Structure formats: C-alpha cells, structure tokens
Image (cartoon, rainbow, N blue to C red):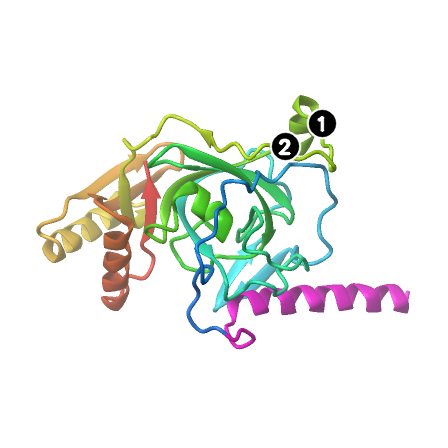
Amino acid sequence: MFNRFNKTATIILFSVLLLQACSSSSRYKINQDHGPSKPVDVTEVGNAVPKVEPRSKYGNPKNYKVLGKWYSVRQSSKGYSKKGIASWYGKKFHGHRTSSGETYNMYAMTAAHKTLPLPTYVRVTHLENGKSVVVKVNDRGPFHENRIIDLSYSAAKKLGVTVKGTGVVEVVAIDPETYQKKEPYQPNVKRPSVLSTYPAKSNYKLYLQVGAFISQQNANKLHQRLSRMFKQQQIHSDFASEKNVYRVRIGPLASVAIADKLSVYLNNKGIPTAQIIID
C-alpha cells in the first residue's frame, strides 16, 4: 500500500513540475522565443498520424494551476470542436520536456492545449486560408488568456501562422479508432507530406466578449459603460439561447492584434474577463 501511494505521489509531483516548467521561463536559456536561425523547408514534414495510445502518466492531473489560474483537464477529447486563436512556440522550448514527458521538437507536428487529455490528435484548420494539418497534442499551454492552442514551429509554418504570429483557427479532435479504420497505422511507411486544404472560411467575425450575464439589466449596464468608453466601436448585446445568458461584445474587430490591445485596455480599467470569440 505504501509503495503504491509513494509511486502515485511521485507521478503527481512530476506532473505538476512539468506543468510548471511549461509556464516558467527560468529553465530556458533563450528569453525571447523565435524560429530556426536559418529558413527551414517544412513541406516534407507530414501530418501526425492518429493512433490509439494510453493517456500519458504525466500532464493529466484532474486540475492544475498556472499563473494563478486553475484549469480542469477533460476526461475525453470526444466531440471537442472549437474556434479561436492559435499561437506557436519554437526554439526557446526545443529539446526541453513537454508536460507529457516527451521532448519538445519544434520540427515535429505537435501542439500544446490547456485542457485536452495528453495525448490527443486534432485537426487544425486556418480559417483565413483554408489550410489544415493534423497534430499530436502532447503539451500544456498556451497560457495567454485569448489563445486556444500553441502549435509547433513546423505546424504553424505549414498553416501560415508564423507570418503574423497568430491565426484564427478551428480545432477538432480526431478519434484514432475511426481514423485507423480509414487508414491503418503503418509506422514504417513514409506518409505523403500533403497539406490538406479546405475552402477558406474568411467570412468569420471576430469579437471581444466582455461579459456574459443571466441578468439582462446587468448586461445593459455594461453595454452603456462600454458605449461611453468606445464611441467608435460597435457594442453588441444579444441573448444566447443555448446558454441562457446575455452577452456583451465589442466588434466585429479587424484583427487579433486589435482584440489583444482592447483586452489589455479593459483589464487596466478593471474589466479583466474579456475573451476573443469567433463567429
């Protein structure tokens, strides 16, 4: 009993240390992250190939805390689909351990996510250009308030995300069993480096959701406050029937950079909960 408890405690401790390592820059020699020193051709880097794997022993605690905020790891990736902002990470973390215990390779097709189980395979589609890749989620992050996934350098480069540093994407979890029935996993067979392309969905709209309320009166108060602060921006109040809440949003906005600046401004004004929403 003691040995089993001791082993479990060690695994939990190691998981916490890995998660903390991913959120701290103290163990990395490079202060500012960047890509390879010389241009790299990533066209021959094939998609990650989904296969059935056991959950990682590390990086899957029920809950964990980073930068003062708690996150809950999902029990399953089944049915996960979400639109949001992707970022990427590169040389600063290259060669260091990920939250799953694997070594981060910026040239591999991997990614970091805050709540999906490790590992999870996902398809990431860049909504601005229709490009799509499959990556293996084996790390935790990004811990920026308005980012949903952190792509490896190669994945980001193939999607065109490295150009601006961020990209509007759709992340959809893949069921490895269903995927394998369509294309059985053969580890010794070289996969074609074909980049799937879907029709670009550039007709999306980007908003900054500043609040969501059960009370319409409270939503109206925030709407009026924002209208005084941002006379040149459109302020929307609408009722989300699927969630039974009144939402207050600024937008549509022209870019992620503008949304980020507005979010920082609102935080300085005592409104810290603004979230980027893609419709």
Q: Which mark is residue 54?
A: none
Q: Earlier in the sequence, mark 2 or mark 1?
A: 2
Most common secondary structure along the magenta stretch: helix
Q: Which mark is residue 184?
A: 1
Front in this rendered view, residue 114 or 191 = 191
Q: Which residues are magenta?
A: 1-29
Residue 117 in the image: state x and y as whole percent.
62, 47
Question: Would you call the spot at circle 1 few (<14 residues within 10 Å), some (14-19), or many (20 or more)?
Answer: some
Quadrant for the N terminus in the image: bottom right
Label 2 sits on a secondary structure element that is loop
| Residue at position x 47%, y 58% in the image | 89
Residue type of the residue flagged with mark 2: Asp
Mark-to-mark CA distance, 2 and 1: 13 Å
The residue under label 2 is 175
> Is residue 106 placed above or below 82 in the rendered structure?
below
Hey, which quadrant is residue 205 in on the image?
top left
Residue 71 in the image: state x and y as whole percent.
53, 57
Residue type of the residue flagged with mark 1: Pro
Label 1 sits on a secondary structure element that is loop
Hey, which quadrant is residue 10 in on the image?
bottom right
Residue 222 in the image: state x and y as whole percent.
21, 52
